[in-house]
Structures are given as structure tokens and as C-alpha cells.
Image: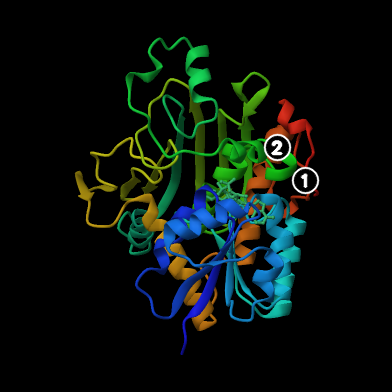
Amino acid sequence: MSAMKFVLVGCGRIATLHVAGYAGRDDAVLWGVYDKNAGAAKKFGAEHGIEKIYDSYEAVLADPEVTAVELLVPHHLHCEMTVAACKAGKHVSVQKPMALNLEECDIMIAAAKEANVCLKVYENFVHYPPYQLVKKMIADGEIGEVRGIRYKMNNGALNSNNAPAAKARAKMAGVKDVDSLPPTGWKVDTLSWTWRLNESLSGGGPLVFDDGYHKFSLFVDLLGPVEKVCAWIDETPVFPTVYQDAPAVIMWKYKDKKVYGTWDITSSEELYIQGKYYTCDERMEVTGSRGVLWITRCTAEMLADVAPVLMYRDGKLTEYWDMPHDWQDSFINSTRDFIESVKNGTPPLLTGERGREVLRFALAAIESARENRAVELDAYGDKPLPKRKGFLSIFRLGKK
Ligand SMILES: NC(=O)c1ccc[n+]([C@@H]2O[C@H](COP(=O)([O-])OP(=O)(O)OC[C@H]3O[C@@H](n4cnc5c(N)ncnc54)[C@H](O)[C@@H]3O)[C@@H](O)[C@H]2O)c1
């Protein structure tokens, strides 16, 4: 059997991490790339030894050689490009968040069903090895019955290559020597922030709606469906008239169990976070009837000297180091999940239906903050997101 051929569509920041999962396989090959910015596609192809550079999305979909596409494009394009791929009979992996609203999710799910192709939502946190270990330990009863979850997310801007307007924010905060620490994190193109901070293209705030999709996904993956959510989502200026959706606190209750979760998000202009990727650091704590488990990182490495997983039980703290724990490892596993699904005709971990459930959780949290009340997920209607402050948000450049 010849190798299945996969094409990356969108050669921006995240595409870099979508390559390694194909390495060393003879059943699947990263066959080609396309980006509407032809220069970006060419450069990416040259850097990663990918020869086939398509000059339009239509050309990718018309190529009978192509088995599947990975869509790595701004969120407002996820729905229409997924539907087009399904109609062309191509299997699809679409980066998170799945879409801008539930109606789009339904359209995407129906299109994949109709064409009988795989639809995967590419959310990598559920494939992060320390999280996978904790999930298994919980299933094995290591900490007894789960009683609650606590999650913390820090965004640090000091000397960050990817935090928006990092230098200006540090100066505004009165930091005297902005360059006293080496630059940290990977570089993000300014153009990437222009669509992210524009609500008609990104669908919501960069922290709760966009990056937050990962966290909502983890919470559902670990303990199942959520009954209701209650949130406060405030705003922090990252530049005069441009705002981030933090600080925020989100609480939820699981369906049919007396288990609650809390998650708080902070954005700190003077906080230096070491790491190779985004300067965003996460920690998770799961309390059980008998013990407590911690995952000490995911994207960045604020607690680099602490074990990725820790368990406290029976008066003893145990460290777990023996697993890959670079953020990239979650991408490698996620890509493999997609390849295996396409190859075997089995569902990926994050199906369209699961992706929709995660999006509903996120949208219900945002509705809760907007309306200052708890929101039952089953009763959640598909309303437009609130307009945030900031000049970028008032431009509605994209079609919705
Ligand atoms: N899993 C993660 O942790 C993670 C992290 C970052 C981004 N993402 C997701 O990946 C997607 C892309 O994000 P990014 O950070 O790489 O953005 P980016 O802005 O860096 O790159 C987007 C790329 O898409 C290209 N593009 C735009 N419109 C296109 C079109 N019609 N056809 C083909 N190419 C087009 C742009 O030219 C650009 O090169 C988003 O959905 C985002 O949520 C996921």
C-alpha cells in the first residue's frame, strides 16, 4: 500500500509543530503545503523538505493523490474550508477552536458525515503525555474518587517574543530595564495578532475563547460532560484601546456528579516566563478522596525543576519524571491520532461532536460572564459573542 498523503493548509506559527508527527512512517507522508501567502508556503516547504507547494486550496482539493488536509488557518475559515474538504472527499483535521459558533460546528459535522470522511478537532493538550498519565492514574483509582479540579493559567509578557506589545506594556508598567532578562518564547508574527484581536475573525478573546479551548477540552476529556458554568471575565489593556480577556475566573459543575472545577487566568506584564513556545504557563491540580495529583506544566516551563507529575497520597509525595514532557510531544501524539484514524477508519480522540461540546462549554462561560449568571449548558443558545472594547474589535473584516 502506498503512503497516505497529507497536506498542511496554512503555514503560519503553529504549522511548525505539525511536521514531527509524520517522521519515520511509511504509511503516511507530509506530502504538500498551501498558504494563501505563497512566500510563506515556499519558505515552509524549503525548511521542512516538502516539495509539493500548491497555489490554491482548490488545487489541493482537486488533487486525487491527496488523502487528507490539516487546516491551520484563522478560526473564521475553519467551517467553510472543512466543508469544502469534505465535499472533495478529503479527511480533515481542523485546528482548535473548532469554529466560531455551534451552528458552524453542526454544518461541519454534517458535511463529514455526508462525505463519510474523518473530522478531527486538533486540540493537542489532551495528548500531552503528563496529562495522559494523570488521566490513567485517575482511571486506575490512584487518588480514589475525584472530588475537584483546580487549573491555573499565567500569561507573562516580560521580554516575551510572543506576548502582544510586550515591551510597551513593560514600559507602561514602569519596568526600568526591560532587557535585563533574555528574550523568551517563540516569535509570533504581528499579523497573527491582528486577526486574533479582531472578534469577527477570531470569534472571541485570545485567552478564554482561543487558548482557553485547550483547557475546556481537558476538563471535558478528564471527567465528562459539564452541567453548568459560572464565569467572571474582565479585561486588561495590552495596548491603548486593545484588550485581553483577563483576569478571569471560571467555575463549573459536572453532570450527574458532585464534582466542581475552577480555573483562573491572569495576564502579567512584568512576569518573566521561561519557555520555548508561548509565554503561557499552566498547572492543574486534581483532588481525590484519597490523594492529590498535580500536572506542573504544559506550554512553558515556569516550574522546570519540578517533576511534570506529582502525587500526594498516604502522607507521601511521589514525583513522576519518566515521560516525554515537551509541549511538542502533545502535537506528535495528536498528529499520530489523526493518521491512525484516517488509516483505520476509527474516530479520533476529538471528534466533531466532542469539539462541539467543548465549544459549547466555552461559549456558555462567556455568556455567563456577560449576563452575570450561571449558565446551564443544555439550555445554552447560540448567541453572538459580546463585543469587546478596542479598536480592532470594531472592524468586521471577515465574513461570518
Ligand atoms: N494547538 C495550539 O496550541 C495552537 C497554537 C496556535 C494556533 N493554533 C491554531 O492554529 C490556527 C492558525 O494559527 P497560527 O497561530 O498558526 O496563525 P498564523 O496567523 O501564524 O498563521 C495563519 C496562516 O494561515 C494563512 N492563511 C490565512 N488565510 C488563508 C487561506 N484562506 N488559505 C490558506 N492559508 C491562509 C496565513 O497566511 C498564515 O500563514 C488557528 O486556528 C489557531 O487557533 C493552535
Question: x%, y% of residue 72?
Answer: 58, 56
Is 256 left, or right, of 318 in this rendering? right
Depicted 239 relative to depicted 291: above or below: above
Position in image of residue 133 (x %, y %): 33, 59
Q: Residue sitting at 57 percent across and 38 percent down?
A: 207
Say what amino acid the circle numbered 1 marks: Gly
Whether residue 381 is visible: yes
Report if the CB atoms under discs 2 and 1 are less than 8 Å apart. yes
Which residue is more in the foreground, 251 or 81? 81
Q: For the residues marked 2 and 1, what is the alpha-carbon distance in whole angstroms?
A: 9 Å
The residue positioned 73% from the left and 75% from the top of the image is 87
Residue under numbered circle 2: 198
Q: Is mark 1 within 8 Å of ligand 1?
A: no
Q: Residue at x 38, y 40 (%)?
A: 300
Viewer-nearest residue: 159 or 313: 159
Can residue 234 be seen here? The reply is no
Q: Amino acid at mark 2?
A: Asn
CA neighbours of label 1 inside 10 A, class few (<14), some (14 to 19), many (20+): few
Residue 246 or residue 163, whichever sits in front: 163
Q: Is residue 157 left or right of residue 393?
A: left
Q: How is the image coloured?
A: rainbow
Image coords of residue 223 (percent x, y): 49, 57
Q: Which residue is mark 1?
A: 398
Provide the secondary structure element on which disc 2 rests: loop
Q: Earlier in the sequence, mark 2 or mark 1?
A: 2
Q: Is residue 313 above or below residue 157?
A: below
